Amino acid sequence: MDGIFITHYDTREYISPIDRNSLHVKVKCAAAADCSVSIVYWNKFRNEFKEGRLESLSLGGPSEFYSTTLAFDEPAKYLSYYFVIRHGDDRFYYSPYGLADQLPAKHFEYPSTNVDDVFTVPAWAEGSVGYQIFPERFGNGDAGNDPPNVAKWNDPPTRDNFMGGDLRGIIERFSHLRDLGIDIIYLTPIFCSPSNHKYDTTDYFKIDPSFGDTEDLKELVALCHSHGVKLVLDGVFHHIGYYSYQFQDAILNGKDSPYWSWFFIQGDTVDTKAVNYECVGYYKWMPRLNFSNPDVRTFFLSVGEHWIREAGIDGWRLDVADEVDFTFWQEFRRRIKGIDSNLLLIGETWKNGADLLRGDQMDTIMNYRFRDAVIDFFANKSIGRAAFARRIESMLFDYPLASRNVLYNLLGSHDTARFLTVCKENIDTFKLAIVFQMTFPGMPFVYYGDEIGMTGETDPLCRKAMAWDSANAMISEFYKNIIRIRHGSNALRYGDFKHIDTASELYGFIRTYEDETIIVLLNNDQEDCLITGEWLNERASVSVPDSDTVEIPANSYEILSLIREGEGHAVRRMAIELKEQPERQFKNRS
């Protein structure tokens, strides 16, 4: 048993319902040599034993993340189970008492599945392509609502200046989003606020006049819906603006204010110089809210409901979600999903977001773990293929299967340096990462301007006005084409994911959905790579002519579509840059 490290608990993190009649089971198992993992399970009142093999997230290569789906003819209940580890010629058994070489006396248990135990997400969101807009900087469609002393559109951004972007500007530029192939638009806050970013909200029931009004929002929602696009708003419920009437009343009236207990204030009065109240990052202009107060909960439940009923929005992105009382999010989900179960809830977190993805709070999270791994592997080249693969597998393992195809996979946002800047403006590196983002499970999100080659360090330089007059046409076409490829492939939108053990620095994975198979190969190395059909057959478990070859130059990629023909596969190379690579046929060396 030396050299085997295995982890499983009979808790929701490791065994959870896909529906009432099926369960998803996960195990971590690291071993010094190859091993296999299977589960022995039975209804403890029937003693009809079954065994099923768990599969890892890698085809033939090293992986410690295993899972399987168990299907039943009735709702899953009264389940007892243990695991069998086959390690060379040895067989071991894993139970709540640990790893042993004898059949266990104690077993894991799964009691039953209730209807509301099943984690469901909006089907329309699965595999969709999203686009984040910072409204103040996307388009100025109505100069009449510009703030005083508005800067010129292309002036350098500061923390405080305004450039006049508004909802009308988004409406007028909607064709750009339609041509790009966007399915979901997420707007950063649009409610009343004195700042350009609007994260210090003063009135949650009114659109900021510099952005327009409720009728403008309704028009934008209607425009989106007429083209099959969804619109999600930013809910800043963790904190409120310094100039909100609630906080100003607490300043004015102290403990006599009906809003005093809305906040965490130390002392008998609010001291705005000493900042004796909790706020966001010690930033006095954003006082933190107290969700143990029933009035705070009631207020924000009404905000969440109001804009769904009033404007027909399709969901909420919820700011600083991992710092809000989780019982409020449970209540919020019940309220919002009670209106329409197809509404989408996205939680902001910069860490492992599993706590938010238990099926009773968020549908998905902003997946900064994805971004971190991509930067380390592609942009910084500070980790190799094996380390990158492990981080990707760990991330997928940590999150529920139900959320996999809706993970908000981003490379940049209003809080980060732009990704092209992170790549030191190396276009080849940038493209590799975009191909990975657009072929990986989840919802790839584009930060406004990335698709036209905009650059900028973190806030405020990542919040420049949209560079409509200086767009990089090559990058724009690249985005359009890779999004087109994603939309045209069910395997890329909904398919399973497995790594290919390349035994080199070539990074590869395979996506499968029904009869469709896509292989993605990313050469993040400085050396060219030659792939043969024999190699593909061995590494990816497919069947193509052994003599076929494909060359993948350094810092380049290939997307291969495998179409089943008789007993084997025909391979089609999927072109992103048609002008740069006119010859896209899989070549035969003979």
Image (cartoon, rainbow, N blue to C red):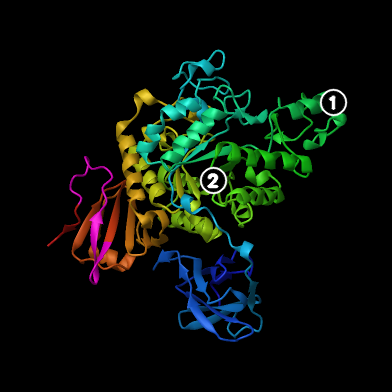
Q: CA distance from mark 1 to mark 2?
A: 39 Å
User: Horizontal placement of 302 versus 582: left or right?
Assistant: right
Instruction: Label 1: state its secondary structure.
Output: helix
Vertical order, 524 against 63 (above or below): above
| Residue receiving disc 2 | 366
Q: Is residue 353 shown to the viewer in this render?
A: yes
Q: Compare residues 222 and 77 and report the one nearer the observer.
A: 222
What quarter of the picture does the N terminus occupy? bottom right
- Tell me where residue 261 sits by quadrant: top right
Report if residue 359 lies within the magenta region: no
Which residue: 73% across, 38% down? 289
Of labels 1 and 2, earlier in sequence is: 1
What quarter of the picture does the C terminus occupy? bottom left
Q: Compare residues 368 and 61 and report the one nearer the observer.
A: 368
From the top left corner, tell me how far across and down residue 83 is, in percent: 56, 77
**Residue 4, which numbered label?**
none
Residue numbers of the magenta segment? 563-584
Q: Amino acid at mark 1?
A: Asn
